[in-house]
Image: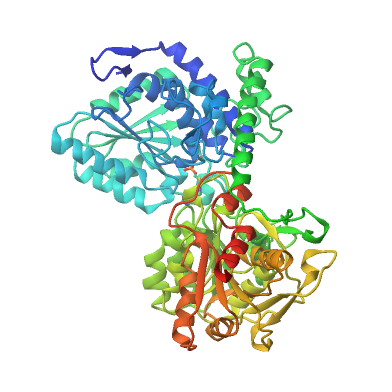
Amino acid sequence: MPIVDSTTGDVRRDYTVQELAHIADEMRVWNTMSLVAAGSGHLGGTLSIMDVAAALYLKHASHDPENPEWTGRDRIFWSVGHKAPALYVALGMAGYFDDRVVTFHGEVLEDLSDVKGIEQTVLLRKLGSGFEGHPNRFKLPGLELSSGSLGQGMGVACGSALHAKLTGADYTCYVILGDGEHDEGSVWESAAFAAHHELDNIVAIVDLNGLQIDGRTEDVLNKQDLREKYRAFGWEVFECDGHDMTAILDALKKADAVKGRPAVIVAMTIKGKGASYAEDVVGYHGVPPKNGRSGDESLDKLIEDLGLQDVFPRERVDQILEVAERYQAEVHKRVDAMVPKFSRDYWWNAADSMQVDMDATRNGFGGAICALGADDDVCALGADITSSIRMDYFYKPDGKTADPERMRRFFSCGIAEANMALVAAGLAKEGRIPFGGSYGVFSTGRNWDQLRTTVAYNDYQVKMADAHGGVSVGPDGATHQSLEEISLITILPNFIMSVPADSVQTEKATLAMARVPHPAVVRYAREATPVVTTPETPYEFGTANVIRLRQEADRFVDAFEHKLATEYASEDEDIAIIACGPMVPEAMRAAYIIKQERGIEARVLDVHTVKPLDEASIAKAALETKAIVTAEEHQVGGFGNLVAGAIARAAIGKPVKLAMVGVQDKFGDSGQPWELVKSFGLTAEHIATKCLELLG
Ligand SMILES: Cc1ncc(C[n+]2csc(CCOP(=O)(O)OP(=O)(O)O)c2C)c(N)n1
């Protein structure tokens, strides 16, 4: 059934197979245009699934763009949330945005009221646009599921299919999966469930392009033949050329007709299909065309490769890309208005006195894991995002080439974080020091029970890299921004946890945690953040540092002195700002702002080890100052409540004024890293404002 009018049953739109094939290529252009406008996003996997997307949304599935919530619609679950741009252009082409107006967080932008329909997809990954890096079902019509953590769509489809069975509804649940995604055990739990419950109203579609992030699927984790596996699980299996529209439509029809068991279509595809420079290229996973708009590897080259210059002449592309710029200008204005104002601009590098170097804390982890790799006892585990989290520095001591001896001790686990934790536990059991890692949401959340029961309870010295901590991850959005790990990990007996302030301290913390004979997590971030410590800055695992503003200096960092808190004598400061992670540089800047603006003296406490927590130094800060502000790039209280508990337990004999800066009980968002830091209220200006409020 093509696109229908849900009230009359009439066909709203239909296309011939030839038209569909052509439209799929146009969708490839829209998709790539949105990535170029965003400056980020997943090219390879969106281009490989595009023909299937066109077939489903424009011809095969029964749905009504004018009534997205129609209960009789077929459900299409994108388990592969990273392919969101393809989903957005499919919805746009189907007409879901024809009457939609461009908004910023729901506020109508009159200046962009001319932008309708599929053109809106060019707002991909822009703050407040709704076109988030991974689908957020509350933001756009036609989205069945917010997704982005692989391996979860099939289970939801099972539940939705069960409901149809219970009510006698005849909708079909389509699930789009990646081949790499099948590394996740949860896919197979759902596959078994679907077959066990004879869910013949499920049609899974596997985008079998043979690649994932770290390499070819058979090299990352060889799962053998997926078709045989599905058959063994009791599924009916179809295979088709995922770029042949007739074959795709034929497979969909056959899959729909299966009775008594679920069906899967294994669509043989080419990652990057349509862009000559990206086809079957491992590096083209989570990136847009390397040269952007024009050049050998660009949007223009894709248009040329597809022979679509007539449909997308230069002026038209210019005009569409300009929409993104106009929107971005609105975002700038609004985000700027969210930051409290002072007598002058104190932003990083805005003035001479605010000069700092920037480096991502993940690079500090890379430096440490590289050094640790020299130790034969240390092993490393990859979960298909090895280089993004800098785990590859383990086996590339020169930063470029893999060292065979170190490769012997590096084990690729695939996208299977729960198993990675268990394999690490086994290695630790035998006396090794294993480092696993992924984005924090997956390396401390996805596998939390494994960390709890197998790692923590057995007190195995598994070391977990918790990358992409905080909203500063940026355009990938909420599913990839971990904001909960301090709570998840510090609650576990035996675990230790470091949340270092900058890249230099991350290196020290990682080296330190390798030596502690317990399980440990180091949390670090993706975005470059101010480097505020040096190799000489005192660092003692488990002891906080006091940071004090001493004088004006040419460079911001030189204006401060760092001391171990145990060696610091009170100067009766007005307030203490207790922070961890990249909020420490913000706390320092806040200290600078309140001193400049109001002559207020602040003690900044850099709590790089959040477990064991330096309770004595925290209690001392509460006793010796008039108020406390905590700062964390985390759900508020994860850290702040640990600090509050420490103060309460110390019973210092006086009431304490305390306020917390952090993410206010909501999920993250897509946007530029610093836009998010500002819009989530995590800047020095926000901390300074809280300090002034508390001090009255
Ligand atoms: C649970 C989980 N772990 C890791 C990731 C990060 N990640 C995003 S896409 C991807 C690779 C997916 O490969 P595949 O399923 O083959 O998709 P395709 O190559 O078609 O894009 C990974 C590891 C994730 N999104 N979810």
Note whether residue 637 is visible.
Answer: yes
User: Would you say 83 lies left or right of 688 here?
Assistant: left
User: Would you say 51 lies left or right of 581 here?
Assistant: left
User: Would you say 63 lies left or right of 478 here?
Assistant: left
Q: Position of residue 597 (x, y in %)?
A: 71, 63
Note whether residue 376 is visible.
Answer: no
Figure check: 146 above or below 299: below
Residue most extreme to the front: 696
Q: Report the number of numbered marks.
A: 0
Residue most extreme to the right: 554
* Quadrant in the picture for residue 90: top left
Query: Who is closer to the viewer here, 209 or 624?
Result: 624
Q: Quadrant of the C terminus?
A: bottom right
Q: Position of residue 121 (x, y in %)?
A: 52, 29
* Quadrant in the picture for residue 337: top right
Q: Position of residue 523 (x, y in %)?
A: 56, 65
Query: Who is closer to the viewer here, 103 or 600?
Result: 600
Q: Quadrant of the N terminus?
A: top left
Query: Who is closer to the viewer here, 518 or 85?
Result: 85
Figure check: 13 above or below 469: above
* Quadrant in the picture for residue 354: bottom right
Q: Position of residue 15 (x, y in %)?
A: 40, 12
Q: Give the residue displayed 47% in from the left and 30% down from the top.
A: 88
Q: Give the residue displayed 52% in from the left and 80% down from the top.
A: 612
